[in-house]
Structure formats: structure tokens, C-alpha cells
Amino acid sequence: MGTTCHCLLFPQGGSGQNCTSTGCVVDLNDSCPSELKVTSTEGDSVACKSACEAFGSPQYCCNGAYSTPDTCKPSTYSEIFKNACPRAYSYAYDDKTSTFTCASADYQITFCPSPNTSQKASQGHNTESTNADKTTPLVNSTMVYEGALSQNGASPSSTVQSHVIAGIVSLAVAIWQMG
């Protein structure tokens, strides 16, 4: 299945050409096509499947004849999610716009943040995160997230790293399954 848990990832003190914050705080259930919706017994939308999970087709799962970046292209379904969350992985080979690499960084991951204080970015706002501006990450091309951050500076680096690894593995599996 796909994922519906909102998540923000903030590199702390790292460097690299594409070392920026990423994530998504959009409720994807609202824009989920009916054929991908998971509903409760009451009929409420509770999750959104990936096209791979819903249809099992190689073109959506990026396997078989579609197992390379040249043959597996974004589908109309993955583009719905990409439009909602431009910096999040939306299909198996979404590397060009959704891979962020940081050398020597610690990470702060916020799971299921409340988007209650998101603000429209002003035209002149620098959308790339800098070391001095890690608390206002670009969420999509017009939104800057500015709320509901929860930090705990008491954790030792090794504990933070193990939590980061677990979070990244969980995200990678969820994104891979979105197909």
C-alpha cells in the first residue's frame, strides 16, 4: 500500500549540492482517485493505495518489461501525488526530483505534523533550505511549512541516527510500494 502519514525530513548541519529538507503535509486522501481509495466500513476514505497495489500491473509496479528508468514512466496516478507533494517520491524511478543527498548530516524527522501554520511563500522567498534556515522547508512549489516542529535535543547522536535509519527505511518501503 501507499502511505498516508505526513512526514517532514530536515537535514541538520550537512552539506551537498542537493542537501535540502523534504516531505509532505498534504492529506493525499482528499485527492485520491476512487479506484485507489481505501474506505472504512462507514464509507469514509481512510487511505490511498498505490497504483501498483491496486492494479498489480507491471507498468505501475515498474517490474517485468517496465523495470528500468527508460521503460517505467510516471503514471497519471503518480502524477496526482507528485502534484500534491513535488519533493516526495511518487513512483519507482522518481530520482531526479525526489532524491536528496547530504554528507555528514544529522536528521530531524517529524511524523504526522499538523499543517495548521503553513503559509504561502512570498514571491521573493528563497525556497532552498540553508543551514541557517532549516525550520522553513519547502513543502511544494508554493508552500513553506512553518509549524508543529517537535525537537528533542537530549538524544545522543547515535540514537538519532538509528531513528533516522528506521524512518528512512520505513519511508523507502512505503514509497517503493506506491509504484
Image (cartoon, helix red, strand yellow):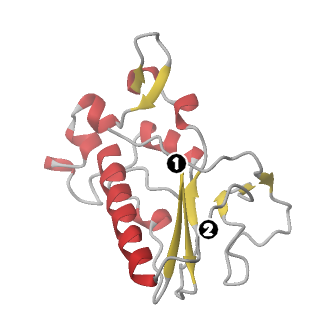
What residue is at 54 percent from the left and 79 percent from the top? Answer: 19
Q: Relative to 56, does residue 22 appear above or below in the rendering? A: below
Is 115 positioned to the left or the right of 88 in the image? right
Three-letter amino acid code at the position of disc 2: Gln
Three-letter amino acid code at the position of disc 1: Lys
Q: Which mark is residue 82?
A: 1
Say which residue label 2 marks. 151
Mark 2 crowdedness (10 Å alpha carbons): few <14, some 14-19, many ≥20: few
Furthest-front residue in view? 154
Q: Which mark is residue 36?
A: none
**SS for tag 2?**
loop
Q: Percent x, y for residue 116?
A: 74, 45
Are circles 2 and 1 on residues that touch, CB within 8 Å?
Answer: no
What residue is at 54 percent from the left and 85 percent from the top? Answer: 17
Could you tell which of marks 2 and 1 lies nearer the N-terminus? 1
Mark 1 crowdedness (10 Å alpha carbons): few <14, some 14-19, many ≥20: many
Q: Percent x, y for residue 131?
A: 66, 84
Q: CA distance from mark 2 to mark 1?
A: 28 Å
**Front label number (2 vs 1):** 2
Quarter occupied by the C terminus: top left
Q: Percent x, y for residue 96?
A: 45, 67
Q: Relative to 21, does residue 17 appear above or below in the rendering? A: below
The reply to whether residue 41 is in sight is: yes
What residue is at 50 percent from the left and 74 percent from the top? Answer: 107
Is 35 positioned to the left or the right of 23 in the image? left
Q: Percent x, y for residue 51?
A: 34, 35
**SS for tag 1?**
helix
The reply to whether residue 179 is in sight is: no
Q: Relative to 18, does residue 97 appear above or below in the rendering? A: above
